[in-house]
Every structure is written in structure tokens, then in C-alpha cells.
């Protein structure tokens, strides 16, 4: 018995030991995380709060002052100095790397020894009136040198002389009206148009197409004065001596005119100036309305319809030329602007992603300015600077985003988005594969009384979610979210009960990323700079640090439906031709339906995703990332190889306006203008077919991959 | 003491219990795999062996017999029947899904009631000689209907009549020689050329450019007879009544001529026949040499140089027209071939990947044949069929590849690679993001005495590694690997001591995948069908199932260096112009150097990769997968928007030959031919710059992503 009891005791001991060991084993097994590098979402949320809180208005003001002390036109020494300073400070803020990336692009400057101006000349050829050579210098700025006088960058050189014709805003429809209704041919004439409504480069192109030998653009108070506001320096309305600088290229996304499609590097082949993309062949010059009055006041010819009349005390007669009394007087343009290949500098800063270093979220904005850039672009650049500082602070606390963040200070935006486009061309292949989103940071401040957001539909949800987490900066709105404040002021009435978000057009540095490469993009502006910083910063933070990409295919589906309806409605202006040429939008609608179903299915599957499995997460994130890419047609829009987004691009008639289904839109626009209606309608059909295909193909990217 | 000792005993017990539990915990913690779904590499190797062993020559023979009983031209009922049978059998073999994917493309058939032929007519217009309407029927095939007579698919209709001019192979250089050295203008003439050396479509294009109003192509024994072999049916030389069918399009990768760039679906806009891509504007017809003798024997004009003479017992005079004795006789072509939009069917089968379902490895080959397709394509299709059967067998044993495998039976390859190109267009967006590699399976069997492989450089290592694991199928080579057998027979002497691998050209279904989309691609052929099956099958197995993609950037670097040297050498034929126009290849060489360094660094990092981390593995695999994509230029080669691979594409002068740096190659080719040498050399410079940029950009994809 003794032995037996001992045996039993031993058996018990062994069982106990085994059980204890086994218990330990089980606990150890389950205690170990399956995927140790899964992001901790609550930590990410905490860091977001810290990140947004760290953004300080005082600092933004400081950055803005620092970078607007001196004029810093692209290609000048001062703009390089600012670039070097930004590089130094971003390094100090703690970014992993900050590089200076140069390109040699075509820029354009007035000739310092031969100023540009416009004259009225008498029959002897004597200049009896000349427009001003510079803007009046505001008080306190008398000692600043290097203020470039108003000019049209990339204007052709020349001294054309002739009669003036006034063509309103210089839009396609204005030239049609001039030629067809007023019976006036501008061949060999100099046209004068007012600024506004469309991109100035389109005005120049229209003038060239109509045969003009020069074009003068002026800023009319009807377009540049707000009621009850004094002109600068007493108020913020445009003074009569102020003229709008700007480039007059028709690049359609080509970047550097001499190296379309490729980065402007040492080894890059350059076209000659004659072959360059989008360079106007006629002289162009901008003037203020004080000067414009002198050119307009004695004009003869027809009195135009009221909507051609601006706010000056002149009759806005069409011409050609002056009234009989002054009929011996002509207008002469004296333009000596030079094009020259010049080195520009982007500054590129990086925070390496911890888990997915090969996924990029980009915040970019330009640095170059026509003069000081107090608003455009430094109000935006100061925001980027502060965002970098705040991100650096977080890095020092041990945070590191899941994905890589890239910060960019672009050069030569004012000369045709050159810095951003060259970098996009240089990095096209990696960006295509790796870029999650591009957030643009041009002028942060605009005369808007609430937040203004333009972005791709897949970002809608994120913008709404984020703005709900940011406090309204408006006085008397304590405890109110930015979302509520925005919603109250700018509801998207017709479409849904939510704050209005607009389509992206062009005219700033997101262009190459969005319209050429198909990277989800957005921009935000507001008179309240800190709120803008938090929106821009919050967007890149959440895009870079969320385990699941905060992009919505459902929102894209909803927008596509709206756009399809609206373009079909536009076509309905021609009901007979739609029937004659058998033009139908049915295939586009069924593609949108297909996309809607695919998007819904995708988001359903997302709900049951095993977020502990890094590959499963990556597969679905890739589908979200590549959704925007699916709307890119490598063949480009007709005649515009660098505008490749089938859903969003500017119309051919106005670079500033973002159109949906731009291929169809342009084809419909051309109907009016075509000598061969059947051919024109076939092009509409072709464009509908391309749109339907693209939407179907995009839907396919959202279905389970196998 | 008693109490104390008890206490001590209890302490010991607690320590023991804790220690045991802790030991268990530690063991449990470490026993649990970090990433439970990591592929088991030794299991994969075992499955590879089973997969290759399962491939049986008897079965291949059986598949081949089954699918060559009846003619199955694209667009015919029989070819649809075979498609349905393949779909059924692939389902039975166990694929996860097998789908029939139709497109409506432009095909071309002889008019059944008005046969095509060529006549000699006398001065009264009477046909005194007509070429045969069909090939002689071999014994045993008397009852087979639906054998399409020899014709040139997509020939223009027409009955041109005129004098013949003989232009050798109809190459660019032949026409130059004719015009410049022999002083003969073919405008308004009918040209007769022999088959061979270049793609027939290029001959037709050259004839059109030279102004000919018709073109006749014949197969000359000099090019289609092997010494000491009897003509069919006594041996395998081409009989005099045999004529080569084939399409005469100049598609340059466009796919369906009416829907370039987009899949030919119900909703797709179709160009008119006049606008279609690559359709010849003149009648074209192929004849055998029995008929050719009749056309050639009475020709007058100059006696050509010896290298223009073929193997027929005629003098191969150039013409134009017949000798004086027969000068009233003319040649008339009677061509009534019809173009018509016709439905075709691809069969697409899928095995879903276990871990990375969104990564695709494709094995595709065509099914349509001009007649029975005993070699082209069914020797290859039988191999695909057997590969699918073997993969299905493995699936039933519980295996599932890491990545998705896609098997394709393409339609209408003979009509311009239409089935494969339309599917590539349809799926371009997902393929661009997800396709790892495309392995082509056209005719498996060719008159080669050893293995013949054409593939992208990144596949070289894999091909070598795989063939070392496959036994030589040659008699008397027991225990010898396929690699050794191949190496012995076809050493890559000049470049390295290894079996020769060639560049991919065009002329089969890999074209859209490789040259348009930039997907790593390869093909393998051999007279030994089972070995071909094992090579093709082994390639897709390893590409789909290896944890790390078996692609080599180092091999690409080595090839780029070789290609750069060879194109620079070609340019050296014009040393003076290189100096005059400052043409240098230095930038290209430094780009290659940059690529070489990046590739080496990449493979170094690969050695220290933590293969237990699925995201780290995926990041590097993605770099490997996207390497080929980096060589794609979305702008395409000059005038060829669908040939977009900067490193590999056919020359503009011969679709069959794959050139390296085709943009530079074509620009150099055009030097000879240009009226403006400066402009032509500027194009050479531009192409060098594009090549340098592309190689730099590809290098960038291999550096650490952040």
C-alpha cells in the first residue's frame, strides 16, 4: 500500500506538473499576438489629437513672415535661398530626409533693359500714350528691389501695331459671338479682353485661333471689385494701377514646354522653342484698368450687349480701332520678354513609413511667387511648414506613421506647375505603384466665409469624418465642429444634406498627380489658416496612419451617377441629333450601375476583413489605392496626352474649370463648332464608349481579385 | 521550526508551480509561429516535383488528337465547340472557375462564291493562266470540309491589272535597292515578293509605301526547303502547291483594327473600315511556288544580284512586266476577301491564390488555327491542357498556390493576336497592378534540336534553375539535366557560358502583355513536347508558388549593358555625324550603371530580408513585379502608341524581330532614309534621352522605397 500510495502520489505530481506546464503553454500561445506589427489604432488616434493640437497659429504667422520678406520669383537666387532654408528647417524639425531636387525648365522674364508696354501711336508713329512700366509701390516697400513688373510669362516677343478689337472675356463663345453675330474678323488685329471667367492661357489661344496678332488683358473693376470695399491700400479691392501677372501657356499638363512627358534633367532632350508645347506665337500683355481706360475710351464700332460691358466709365465699343476722330491712331505692343532655360528647385522631405514604407501620402505646395507671395502661395506654404513641424514633434515622441509621408515645396508653379510636374514625371513609375493620395497646399487663405474643399469623391467621407473632429474656428462657435460650421454655411443642397465639396479643376500643383497619374487628390482652403492646417494635416495623417485606407468607393459611385446624369442632360439639348445619330448614354448608365454594385460589395467585404492578417489588409488597401488609377486612360484625352483622367479634367475651353467626363463634355462642346456634324456626333459616341469602358474597368478593380 | 519549514516548503511549491507555468508559457510563446500563413517552402518543392511528374506525353498526344480533328478557324462554329470543350474539361480538371469571354472583332474570310486567284491575261483580257484555288488535298483528308483556301487575311478587295515587279523579300532595303540602284519605280505596278525574313505585313506596307497597286507573295524553295528532305507527303518540305496563309495587317499591337485601345465589346465604338488600324489598301495574295513559276518565268527587265535569286528554275528578272515576247500579257489579281465583325471566344481558367489572390501568373496560348493547327497552335494548346490537368490533380491533393494562376485559350491569334489583345485591353487596369508574369504557349514544337527560350532578362535565372531540375528528354542522356543538354547544344558563346536565351520579338500572344503592359514574359519551344510542358508548367508553378518572386534584377542589368553597347556600336557606323550632331550614348551608359548598382543593392537587401514578415516580403516582391512595368512609356514608341516597352519591341521594319532599345534602333534605321539628316539625328538624340530616363526610372524602383 505504501508503495502504491507513493506511486499514486507521483502520478498526481506528474499530472500536476504537466497540467501546470500545459496551462502555461496555452496562456503563452494565446498571449502571443498573431501579427505583432499590427497598428495599434487607439495609439494612432491619440497621436492624431496631439498632431492637430501641436499646430499653432502663431507659428504659422511666423513661418509666413519669414518666407515673404523678399520677392522670390521662380529661378531667382532668393527663391533658392528660401528653398535652402526650408530644407534646413525641415531637417531640424526631424524629417528622415530632406532633399533639394533641381530641374532645368523653360522660364520667361521681362527684358531688364527693354521694358514691356503698350502705346497709342499717331500717324507719324509717335507714341502719344504709354502704359505704365510698373505698379505703384506701396508705402514701406520703396527699398525692395527685384519686384518683377506685370507681364505675361512666355509671351512671344514683338511689336505688332494695329487696330484694337474688344472681345469681352475672350472665351470661345465670345469669339463666336464676335464673328457670327457681330460679323467682325480679328485677323491682323490686336484684341483686348478683360480678365476673368476662364484661364488667361485659353484667352490667348482663342485670340491666336481667331487670327489676332496680339492680345492685351486688363482687370476690370466689374470683375475685381467687391461692393463697398476701398481699393488697396485703403481696402482690399484691386487698385487701378494693379495688373495681373501670369503665364499664358496652353500646356494641358505637359510641364516644362521643352521636355513634355519627361523630367527636365541634364540628359533630357529639349525641343526647340518653335516645337515647345503651348507657347503662344503672339505678344501678350496685362494692364491695370487705369491704363485700360486710355485704350478703350476712344474705341469705335458697335456697342456690345450689356453682358460685355464692365465697370469702367467707357462704352466698351467693339472696334475695330478708334472712332473716326482718332482713326489715325493705332495701338502698338512693345514686348521683349525672354524665354530661358533656368534651374528650379523642389524641396522634398520624407518620413519613412513603419510598416508600409512603399505607400506614399504626399502633401505638396509651391514656394515660388510672382512677388512676395503673401497669399499665393506662402499662406499655404506656411501651413505645410507648420504641419512638418508638428509631424516632426510627434516623431520625437516615438510615433512613426504606418505609411511614408512626403512633403514637397514646389518651384515654378506660376510658370505652368513646372516643379510639381517635373517631379511627377521623374517619379511617375514609383508614384503610379505606391502613391495613396496627394493633398495640395496652394494659398490656404481665400475670400471664403467657410471651409472650401475640392477633392476626388473617394475622399469625401474622410473629409467629413475629419472635420467632425476639428473645432470650428469661427467666433461664437465654441463646442461646434468645423463640419457643423461648414455645413451650416455651405450646404450641398441639391445633392445631399452635407457640406458642399467641389470637383478638382486645374491651376495648381495637384494636376500632374491627379489628372495625369490618377492619384486620389484634394485641397482645402479657408480664411482661417489654423483650420486649414488641421484639415490638410489631418488628411495626410489619417491617410498615412490608418490601418485601412480611409477611401470610399461608394462615394465615387454616387458621384459617377450624378456626373452621368448631368452629362446626359447636357446632350439632351440636341434631342433630334441624339436620335439621328443614335447617341445613347445607356451604356454609361449601366457601367455606373455595375460600378455601384461592385463598390457596395467591396465595402461589405471590408466589414468582415480579418484585420489581424497583414496580407488580407494589404490586398484590400491596394484595391482602394488603385481605384483612382483605374480612371486613367494611357491614351489621354483627344489632343491632350497628359490629361488622362477620364472622369475629371479641365475642359479644353477653360483650364480652371474641372469637368466631369471631360472627353464627352468637349465632344459636345465641339458640336456647335463643327463643319461635319456626323463626325462630331461620332466623336461624342466614341467618348461615351470610352467613359463606359473606363467605369466598367474601374468596377472590375473592386471585385474580389480571384 | 515546524511552521517555518512548512512555509519554506510552500514557498518552494509556489516557486515550482510558477516556474512550471512560466516554462510552459515560454515554450507556448515560442512554439507559436509568428506568421502562421507563411508558405512552407519544402512542401512547395515537393508539390513542384509531383506537378512535373504528373505531366504525361500520352495525355499530351491525346489532347492534341482531340483538338485537331477538324479545321477550327477563328470565328467558326468548330472553334467555338472546341472552346466549350476546353471550358468543360478545365472545370473537370478542377479549376476554381472557367469562363468563356467573347469579343466582337474584325475578321476576314475569302468570299465563298467568288474565289481569290491571280491570272495572266492576254491583250484581249482573257485569262490564259490562273493560280490554283486550293491546296492539293492530302490522302485521307478528302472528306474534310471547311478548309479555307490560302488567302491573305484583311487584303483589300479588288482586281488590279498591270505589270509585275519582283522585289526579293519586300524588305525596306529591297525596295531601296530597287528604287535607288536599279532605278525602278513600282507606282501602279503589282509587286511579287518571296516570303521570309520579315513579317508579311511589313512587306505589304512597304509595297503600299512604294506605290504598288497589288502584292503577290510566294514561298520559294530557297527559303522553305531543307536540304535532302522530300516535299510533303513524302517528307516535311513544303510542296509546290502549298501556300502560306496569314494576316497582312500592320497593327503594331493595336488588337482589333476597329477598336484600338479598347476591348471590342457590345458598347464599344467602332471605327469605320476606312479608319481602321493597319488594314492594307491594296489587294494581297499568297501562292505556292508551282504557281509562282508561271508568273516569274517570262518576266523581263534586269537580272538581279545573286542574293535576290531563289531556288526556282527561273532567272528572277526584276521586270517591270514580261519579256518582249509576252509584253502584251498582264497580271490580274482577283481578290474578293471580306472583312466582317465576328464573335470570338477566349477561355479563361483560374486557380485562386491562397495568400496573394491579387497576384497573377498567366499561362496563355491560342486555340484558333488556319486549318487543323497540328503544330500551330495545338502542339502548344495540348501542353497548356496537360498543365491544367496536372495543376488540377495537385489541387485535389490539398495544394493551392500562393498566388493566382490564370490559364487562357486565346482566339483569333492568326488574325492579329486579337483574342489575347482584347482581353489585355479589357483587363489592363487589374493586370497592370497585379500581373507577375505571362508565359506564352504557341506551337510547342519547332524544328529545333534543343530547347529554345525567348524571355525577359529577369526570367533568365529562373529558366536556368528550373531546367536544372528537369531531365533531358534526349535519348542517351539519362541522368543529364535539360540544362546540360541545352547548354551543350546551344551555348551563349559570346556573352556567357550558359545556354542561349533570346529576346522576345512579336508574332504571338505575349505581345500585349509584354510590350504594351510591361508584364515579365517568356516562351519556350522544343521538339520534345513533354519537356516543353515541364518548362512552361514549371515556370508558372514557381512564379505562382515561391514566397520570393524568382525574378532577377541583376540579369536585367547585365542585359541592358549588352544592349546599350550594341546600339552604340550600331550608331558608330556614322562616326562623322555622331560628332557633327553631338550624339552621345554616355547618358545611356551611366543610366545602365545606375541601374546595375540599384539591382545589386536590391539583391543584397533581399538576402537579409525577414521572410517571416509578410509585409516585408510583399514590399520587395512588389518591387520585383513592377520592375518590368518600369520600362513602359505611356507615350509609346514614335507612331506606335501600343508598343510601349522602351527596352523591347519589334522594329518598325519587321514585326518578327525583337529589337533592344527599339526607339533608338528605328531612329538610326531612318537616318538612311531621311531628307533632313539634322532632324533625323535629333530624333536619335531624343530616343537616347528617353532610353536613359527610362533606365534611370527603373533603377529608382529598385532602391529602398523610403
Image (tube, coloured by chain):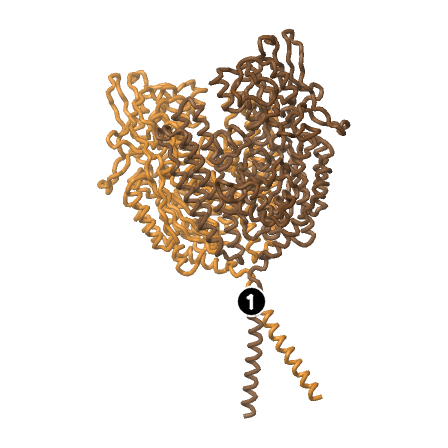
Chain colours: A brown, B orange
The relative height of residue A11 versus residue B322 in the rendered view (above or below) is below
Q: Tell me the quarter of the picture where residue B428 sits.
A: top left
Instruction: Indicate left or right for A517 with B420 as reference.
Output: right
Q: Tell me the quarter of the picture where residue B305 sits.
A: top left
Q: Tell me the quarter of the picture where residue B375 sits.
A: top left
Is A433 or A287 nearer to us in this picture?
Answer: A287
The image position of residue A415, as x and y in percent, is 62, 30
* Residue placed under numbered mark 1 in the picture: A30
Furthest residue to the top?
A124
Crowd band around label 1 with a 10 angstrom C-alpha radius: few (<14), some (14–19), many (20+): some
Callout 1 secondary element = helix
Furthest residue to the right?
A143
The image position of residue A531, as x and y in percent, is 64, 44
Instruction: Indicate left or right for B643 with A232 as reference.
Output: left
Quarter of the image with the N terminus of chain B is bottom right
- Residue A461: tell me if it is visible: yes
* Residue lying at 72% horizontally and 35% vertically, measured from the top left: A81
- Residue B222: tell me if it is visible: no
Is B116 or B464 nearer to us in this picture?
Answer: B116
Furthest residue to the bottom?
A1
Amino acid at each position: 500500500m505504501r508503495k502504491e500510495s507513493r506511486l499514486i502520489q507521483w502520478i498526481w505530481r506528474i499530472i500536476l506538473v504537466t497540467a501546470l506546464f500545459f496551462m502555461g503553454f496555452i496562456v503563452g500561445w494565446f498571449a502571443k499576438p498573431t501579427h505583432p506589427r499590427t497598428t495599434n489604432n487607439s495609439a494612432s488616434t491619440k497621436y492624431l489629437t496631439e498632431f492637430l493640437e501641436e499646430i499653432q497659429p502663431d507659428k504659422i504667422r511666423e513661418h509666413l513672415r519669414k518666407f515673404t520678406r523678399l520677392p522670390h520669383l521662380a529661378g531667382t537666387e532668393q527663391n533658392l535661398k528660401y528653398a535652402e532654408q526650408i530644407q534646413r528647417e525641415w531637417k531640424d524639425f526631424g524629417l528622415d530626409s530632406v532633399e533639394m531636387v533641381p530641374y532645368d525648365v523653360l522660364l520667361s522674364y521681362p527684358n531688364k533693359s527693354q521694358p514691356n508696354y503698350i502705346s497709342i501711336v499717331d500717324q507719324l508713329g509717335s507714341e502719344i500714350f504709354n502704359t505704365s512700366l510698373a505698379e505703384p509701390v506701396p508705402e514701406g516697400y520703396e527699398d525692395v528691389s527685384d519686384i518683377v513688373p506685370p507681364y505675361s510669362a512666355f509671351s512671344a516677343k514683338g511689336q505688332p501695331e494695329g487696330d484694337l478689337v474688344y472681345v469681352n472675356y475672350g472665351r470661345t463663345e465670345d469669339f463666336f459671338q464676335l464673328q457670327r453675330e457681330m460679323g467682325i474678323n480679328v485677323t491682323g488685329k490686336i484684341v483686348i479682353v478683360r480678365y476673368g471667367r476662364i484661364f488667361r492661357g485659353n484667352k490667348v489661344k482663342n485670340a491666336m485661333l481667331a487670327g489676332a496678332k496680339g492680345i492685351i488683358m486688363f482687370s476690370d473693376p466689374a470683375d475685381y471689385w467687391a461692393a463697398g470695399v476701398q481699393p488697396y491700400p485703403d481696402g482690399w479691392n484691386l487698385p487701378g494701377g494693379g495688373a495681373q501677372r501670369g503665364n499664358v501657356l496652353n500646356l494641358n499638363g505637359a510641364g516644362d514646354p521643352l521636355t513634355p512627358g519627361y523630367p527636365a534633367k541634364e540628359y533630357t532632350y529639349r525641343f526647340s522653342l518653335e516645337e515647345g508645347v503651348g507657347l503662344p506665337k503672339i505678344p501678350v500683355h496685362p494692364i491695370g484698368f487705369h491704363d485700360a481706360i486710355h485704350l478703350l475710351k476712344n474705341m469705335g464700332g458697335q456697342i456690345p450687349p450689356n453682358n460685355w460691358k464692365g465697370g469702367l466709365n467707357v462704352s466698351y465699343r467693339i472696334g475695330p480701332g478708334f472712332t473716326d476722330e482718332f482713326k489715325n491712331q493705332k495701338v502698338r505692343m512693345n514686348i521683349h520678354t525672354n524665354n530661358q532655360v533656368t534651374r528650379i528647385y523642389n524641396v522634398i522631405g520624407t518620413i519613412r513609413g513603419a510598416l508600409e514604407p512603399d505607400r506614399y501620402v504626399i502633401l505638396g505646395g509651391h514656394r515660388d511667387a510672382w512677388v512676395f507671395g503673401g497669399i499665393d502661395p506662402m499662406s499655404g506654404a506656411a501651413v505645410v511648414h507648420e504641419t512638418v513641424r508638428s509631424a516632426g514633434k510627434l516623431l520625437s515622441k516615438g510615433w512613426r506613421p504606418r505609411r511614408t509621408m512626403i512633403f514637397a515645396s514646389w518651384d515654378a508653379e506660376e510658370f505652368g506647375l513646372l516643379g510639381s510636374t517635373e517631379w511627377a514625371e521623374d517619379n511617375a513609375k514609383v508614384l503610379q505603384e505606391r502613391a495613396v493620395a496627394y493633398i495640395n497646399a496652394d494659398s490656404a487663405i481665400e475670400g471664403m466665409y467657410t471651409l472650401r474643399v475640392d477633392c476626388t469623391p473617394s475622399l469625401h467621407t474622410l473629409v467629413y469624418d475629419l472635420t467632425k473632429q476639428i473645432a470650428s474656428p469661427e467666433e461664437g462657435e465654441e463646442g461646434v465642429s468645423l463640419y457643423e460650421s461648414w455645413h451650416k454655411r455651405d450646404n450641398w443642397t441639391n445633392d445631399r444634406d452635407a457640406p458642399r465639396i467641389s470637383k478638382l479643376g486645374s491651376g495648381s500643383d495637384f494636376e500632374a498627380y491627379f489628372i495625369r497619374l490618377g492619384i486620389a487628390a484634394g485641397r482645402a482652403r479657408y480664411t482661417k489658416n489654423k483650420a486649414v492646417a488641421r484639415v490638410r494635416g489631418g488628411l495626410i495623417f489619417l491617410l498615412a496612419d490608418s490601418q485601412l485606407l480611409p477611401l470610399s468607393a461608394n462615394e465615387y459611385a454616387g458621384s459617377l451617377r450624378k456626373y452621368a446624369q448631368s452629362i446626359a442632360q447636357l446632350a439632351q439639348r440636341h434631342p433630334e441629333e441624339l436620335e439621328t445619330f443614335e447617341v445613347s448614354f445607356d451604356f454609361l448608365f449601366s457601367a455606373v450601375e455595375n460600378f455601384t454594385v461592385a463598390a457596395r460589395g467591396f465595402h461589405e467585404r471590408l466589414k468582415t476583413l480579418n484585420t489581424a492578417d497583414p496580407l488580407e489588409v494589404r490586398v484590400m488597401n491596394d484595391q482602394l489605392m488603385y481605384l483612382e488609377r483605374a480612371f486613367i486612360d494611357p491614351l489621354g484625352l483627344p489632343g491632350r496626352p497628359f490629361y488622362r483622367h477620364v472622369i475629371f479634367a479641365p475642359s479644353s475651353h477653360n483650364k480652371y474649370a474641372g469637368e466631369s467626363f471631360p472627353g464627352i463634355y468637349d465632344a459636345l462642346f465641339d458640336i456647335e463648332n463643327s463643319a461635319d456634324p456626323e463626325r462630331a456626333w461620332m466623336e461624342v459616341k466614341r467618348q461615351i464608349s470610352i467613359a463606359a469602358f473606363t467605369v466598367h474597368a474601374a468596377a472590375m478593380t473592386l471585385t474580389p481579385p480571384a
